[in-house]
Image: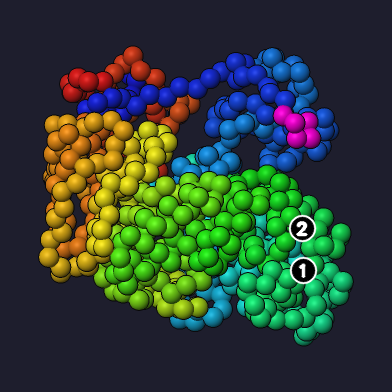
């Protein structure tokens, strides 16, 4: 007999609910007669689109054509395409994702991967097929979004993807078009979203030398480009927007053909391959107004790159129309504090200033490593300091981004030294891999209660920083490994009073902290960070599951290397089925379960 499955915790059981599509009602927006509906979900598929277009045009962001005769949408006046107010491609949804940046050429090979790449200046052989084979590895860390390299054809040597030659064809070094389609589908089947890196500022190295644009498609005329000049002052917008980055031919987005071609290209690219988000390269090198139009045509979450620690200048680009930007000001502060052991007030100051300058700090991309900088461990080999920085990246109020190789403690320096091949290092028992997985798993357990909670600064001094998000408590230090224990007593900055309750470590080490009237006393050993959550949110280690699971139910994902806590209990609650990406055996155990407090 089929039984209902539920996630069992000491305080509550996981429930899932969804509104019937027929219950949704459209709301007319003021922008171009754009219809926005409440989130409509059917088999994990979300519809989107515009009013008043033909069925053939109903292709923007993989829209579905809704006929007026469709019973489930009988309350709508059709035929229309629909896009919801809250859909998985907007910033509110992306804030809840953890992104894994994987250079396509360096992440995974389809063939022999027993030897690391010896020449990092050119193609190493990473591919879309290789990525598909390693999705278990990615998902085992609790990652639910990936950022891949630019996908279009490049000039010679463009293993990174930033040297475009033809924006309408794909880079065959990464695989075929079908391979890319297969990768994105495989990711979507696992509820992993795909962010694609795109370039709208420049093309690649000129095959025929400076002044020869004939090999570029479609921008093959001199008038499509700005004059050949070098950027001499990065604070001069005219120089930055009109001159060349690293000698690369700079597109003239004021030219009508260039402007429209780029906008049409990004719209078609997103739609054709069902891309979930965009990372936009070199945003300060192009006028802000163009990015507003470009992002509108893309129709998905777009995070821009401004490689600058000046918060005022970086904030201008989110405020001018990009969904988000990479939080470089925070990156520099975290490097100073944890790599160089500077005063931890620097983090608190950056966060306070960011709240004043950015339109939405929670949508910013937080990171400690990427492909343009030497890795953290190249400048300081202390893994414990690195874990402190990673804990802040994973738990701060921003969209966390983890650069591939972080989980294997890579320490490459410079370009291309920080772009190592991940093969053959896929050790899922590595301490960094485990550290990332456990933090992400704790967030997944708490769900929206965590994601929707504010960032609360509890206590900061030169060598210690504590903050909370909902029921999560984070303790960080920059003293480094081998140091004396760090002890502090302070009050939690909580809206609710916590008294006579324990915070339990998420690292399964049995540590607890007693809270008395919002006050706690803590001890950090050997310079390691600690992450806790209220003990009544810690799941009981129940192992009984039932094998008769219905795949049509909303899934609960079983992650590799994570002890899944599921049981046959709370029969009155909504059903939860399994997506067994870990490929663990599901064993039928007919034993009584602890069901109190469900």
Q: Secondary structure at mark 2?
A: helix
- Left or right position of 562 against 334: left
**Disc 1 vs disc 2: which is toward the camera?**
1
Q: How is the image coloured?
A: rainbow
Dot 2 alpha-carbon crowd within 10 angstroms: few under 14, some 14 to 19, many 20 or more: many
Residue count near mark 1 (Cα–Cα under 10 Å), binned few <14, some 14–19, many ≥20: many
Distance CA(mark 1)–CA(mark 2): 10 Å
Quarter of the C terminus within the rendering: top left
Q: Residue at x 24, y 31 (%)?
A: 497
**Where on the picture, by quarter, is residue 287?**
bottom right
Judge whether 566 appears above or below 217 on screen. above
Q: Tell me, yes or no, whether the two marked residues, 1 and 2, touch with CB atoms within 8 Å.
A: yes
Q: Main secondary structure of the magenta part?
A: loop
**In the image, what residue occupies the spot 32% across and 47% down?**
457
Magenta range is 29-33
Q: Position of residue 490 (x, y in %)?
A: 19, 46
Q: Which residue corresponds to the image point at 71% horizontal and 74% vertical from the top-left?
A: 239
Residue 251: assigned label? 1
The answer to whether 231 is drawn above or below residue 443 in the figure is below
Residue 468, how many percent across, how many down? 31, 43
Observer able to see residue 131 = no
Disc 2 designates what residue?
262
SS class of the residue under badge 1?
loop
User: Looking at the image, which residue is at 66% across and 81% down?
Assistant: 232
Residue 312 location (% of width, % of height): 56, 60
- Looking at the picture, tell me which residue is in the foreground, 580 or 300: 300
């Amino acid at each position: 007999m089929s039984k209902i499955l539920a996630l069992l915790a000491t305080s509550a059981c996981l429930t899932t609910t969804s509104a019937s599509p027929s219950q949704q009602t459209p709301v007319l927006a003021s922008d171009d007669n754009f219809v926005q509906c409440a989130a409509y979900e059917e088999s994990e598929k979300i519809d989107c689109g515009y009013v008043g277009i033909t069925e053939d045009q109903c292709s923007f962001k993989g829209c579905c054509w809704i006929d007026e005769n469709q019973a489930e949408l009988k309350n709508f006046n059709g035929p229309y395409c629909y896009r919801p107010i809250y859909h998985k491609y907007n910033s509110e949804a992306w804030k809840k994702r953890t992104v894994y940046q994987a250079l396509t050429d360096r992440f995974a090979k389809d063939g022999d991967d027993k030897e690391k790449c010896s020449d990092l200046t050119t193609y190493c052989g990473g591919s879309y097929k290789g990525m598909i084979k390693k999705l278990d590895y990615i998902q085992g860390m609790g990652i639910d979004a990936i950022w891949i390299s630019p996908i279009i054809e490049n000039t010679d040597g463009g293993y990174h993807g930033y040297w475009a030659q033809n924006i309408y064809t794909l880079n065959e070094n990464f695989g075929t078009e079908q391979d890319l389609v297969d990768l994105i589908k495989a990711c979507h089947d696992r509820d992993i979203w795909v962010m694609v890196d795109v370039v709208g500022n420049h093309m690649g190295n000129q095959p025929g030398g400076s002044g020869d644009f004939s090999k570029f498609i479609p921008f093959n005329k001199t008038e499509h480009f700005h004059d050949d000049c070098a950027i001499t002052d990065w604070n001069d917008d005219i120089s930055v927007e009109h001159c060349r980055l690293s000698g690369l031919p700079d597109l003239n987005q004021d030219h009508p053909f260039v402007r429209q071609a780029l906008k049409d290209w990004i719209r078609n690219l997103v739609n054709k391959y069902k891309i979930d988000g965009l990372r936009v390269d070199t945003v300060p090198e192009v006028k802000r107004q163009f990015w507003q139009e470009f992002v509108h045509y893309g129709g998905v979450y777009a995070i821009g790159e401004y490689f600058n620690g000046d918060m005022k200048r970086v904030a201008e680009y989110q405020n001018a129309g990009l969904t988000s930007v990479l939080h470089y000001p925070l990156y520099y502060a975290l490097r100073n504090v944890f790599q160089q052991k500077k005063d931890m007030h620097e983090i608190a100051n950056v966060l306070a200033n960011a709240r004043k300058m950015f339109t939405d700090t929670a949508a910013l991309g937080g990171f400690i490593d990427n492909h343009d900088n030497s890795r953290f461990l190249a400048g300081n080999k202390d893994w414990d300091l690195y874990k402190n920085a990673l804990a802040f990246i994973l738990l701060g109020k921003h969209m966390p981004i983890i650069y591939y190789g972080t989980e294997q403690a890579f320490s490459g320096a410079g370009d291309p030294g920080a772009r190592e091949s991940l093969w053959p290092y896929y050790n899922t028992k590595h301490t960094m891999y485990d550290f990332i997985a456990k933090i992400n798993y704790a967030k997944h357990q708490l769900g929206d209660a965590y994601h929707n909670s504010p960032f609360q600064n509890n206590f900061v001094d030169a060598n210690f920083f504590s903050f909370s998000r909902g029921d999560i408590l984070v303790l960080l230090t920059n003293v480094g490994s081998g140091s004396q224990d760090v002890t502090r007593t302070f009050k939690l900055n909580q809206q609710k009073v916590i008294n006579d309750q324990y915070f339990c470590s998420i690292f399964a080490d049995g540590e607890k902290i007693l809270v008395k009237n919002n006050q706690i006393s803590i001890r950090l050993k050997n310079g390691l960070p600690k992450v806790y959550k209220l003990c009544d949110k810690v799941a009981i280690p129940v192992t009984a599951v039932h094998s008769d699971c219905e795949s049509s139910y909303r899934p609960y994902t079983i992650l590799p290397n994570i002890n899944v806590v599921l049981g046959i209990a709370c029969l009155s609650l909504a059903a939860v089925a399994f997506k067994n990406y870990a490929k663990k055996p599901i064993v039928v155990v007919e034993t009584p379960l602890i069901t109190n407090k469900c």
